[in-house]
Amino acid sequence: MAYNYHRIIIKIGSNVFTQKDGLPDLKRIGSLVQQIAEIKKRGIEVILVSSGAVASGRSLISVSEKFDPIAARQLLASIGQVKLINTYSNLFEQFNILCSQVLVTKEDFRDRLHYLNMKNCLEILLQHQVIPVVNENDVVSVTELMFTDNDELAGLIASMLNAQALVVLTNVDGIYNGNPNSADATIIEEVSGSTIDFSSFVSSGKSQFGRGGMITKSTMAQKTAQLGIAVHIANGTKDNILIDVLENTVAHTHFSPNKTASGKKKWIAHSGNFATGIVRVNDGAKTALTSANASSLLPIGVINILSEFKKGDIIKIIDENDKHIGLGIAEYGSDKANDMIGHKNQKPLVHYDYLYLEC
Ligand SMILES: Nc1ncnc2c1ncn2[C@@H]1O[C@H](COP(=O)(O)OP(=O)(O)O)[C@@H](O)[C@H]1O
Ligand SMILES: N[C@@H](CCC(=O)OP(=O)(O)O)C(=O)O
């Protein structure tokens, strides 16, 4: 049965955007744009997350190896992003569709107000029938400031915009249960329910121009599905792939969505990198937090504070064996929390509405 979505994120990987020689694959991009125009005609809002700036840059200029690799990447991305957006702009124009360029960095997701500004911008673009074309701002995002890859960025945008689905286009048919080049390997078509450890059959290898590889794709997909957003990983090099995925007529990997989390919880879920505090909780608190009932984290269940935090900071919650169980927003700072640890009848350190659990 066809999927009935109203708002979707489509992520195009570098390997789908470019052909083997590194030049943008205009025929393929043209076909994807045509399908997006068709999807839009069906009343579905589309946000495109497209890689390809660095790959496009490589097709325009060659940089000697004597230059610092980080600076060389900045150069390629800065030149290549112009080509990327021009390519999309010219192709969408053929369908009387406007597209826009939205370049973001990891830092844009750190501050809740900044995050909401970005969300508002994307919403107004959608209200005006514009297709936002999102990419990482590779010119200023370097080393630890970078997203793992654009799959991570696509997951964040899907959560931010409360999309029903994220379609990740790559150069293989989906996630295989072994090496995709091996004759015995088959596609895992459905992933639902409990978390699967993909590391036993997904190799860390990447495709020619890819950055994160299939491991980061599967981790991101599981996390996104847990937040209530379906994820489809499919082969963007196949004809008519977007329409076929939405009509459910092509083999690919589908992560079915779990319960829907609130907008605030979705933001917290993706804020692990910005956590300042770390608190260790006892088994009783862990059981309460992870039970089916909505429970806040109370000071009585906290064993100790491993890293200080202020009121409003994101804190990591770990169990007695240092296993990460979730993230939350601190209702008060660690100074106050230290005085309340182990005491009964105290104000929650993390209210349930601001708590995201990973298990
Ligand atoms: N079990 C697996 N199933 C599918 N692909 C895998 C698996 N293990 C490793 N891969 C590799 O992951 C690559 C896709 O990831 P990536 O390089 O990040 O692509 P993209 O540029 O599309 O984001 C595939 O080309 C494939 O070689
Ligand atoms: N922002 C980079 C994309 C890097 C990246 O994550 O690529 P991919 O693994 O192909 O999604 C670019 O436009 O070249």
Image: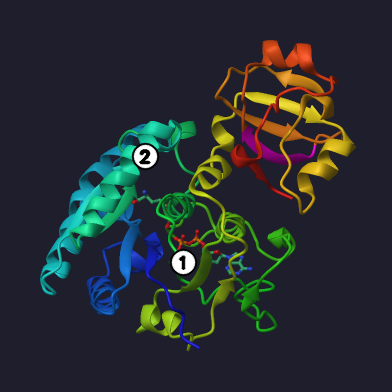
Mark 2: which amino acid? Leu
| 33 relative position to 157: left or right | left
Q: Would you place residue 157 above or below residue 296 in this image?
A: below
Q: Quadrant of residue 136?
A: top left
* CA distance separating discs 1 and 2: 20 Å
| 189 relative position to 234: left or right | right
Q: Quadrant of residue 320?
A: top right
Q: x, y (%) of residue 168?
A: 45, 66
Q: Earlier in the sequence, mark 1 or mark 2?
A: 2
**Residue located 66% across and 31% down the image:** 350
Q: Assess whether mark 2 and mark 1 are in contact (beta carbons under 8 angstroms).
A: no
Q: Nearer the viewer, residue 164 or 171?
A: 164
Q: Nearer the viewer, residue 69 or 334?
A: 334
Is 325 one of the magenta-colored residues? Answer: yes
Q: Which residues are magenta?
A: 323-328
The residue at which mark 2 appears reads as: 116
Q: x, y (%) of residue 111?
A: 43, 30
The residue at which mark 1 appears reads as: 165
Q: Would you place residue 187 above or below residue 261 in this image?
A: below
**Residue located 40% across and 74% down the image:** 236
Give the SS element for disc 2: helix
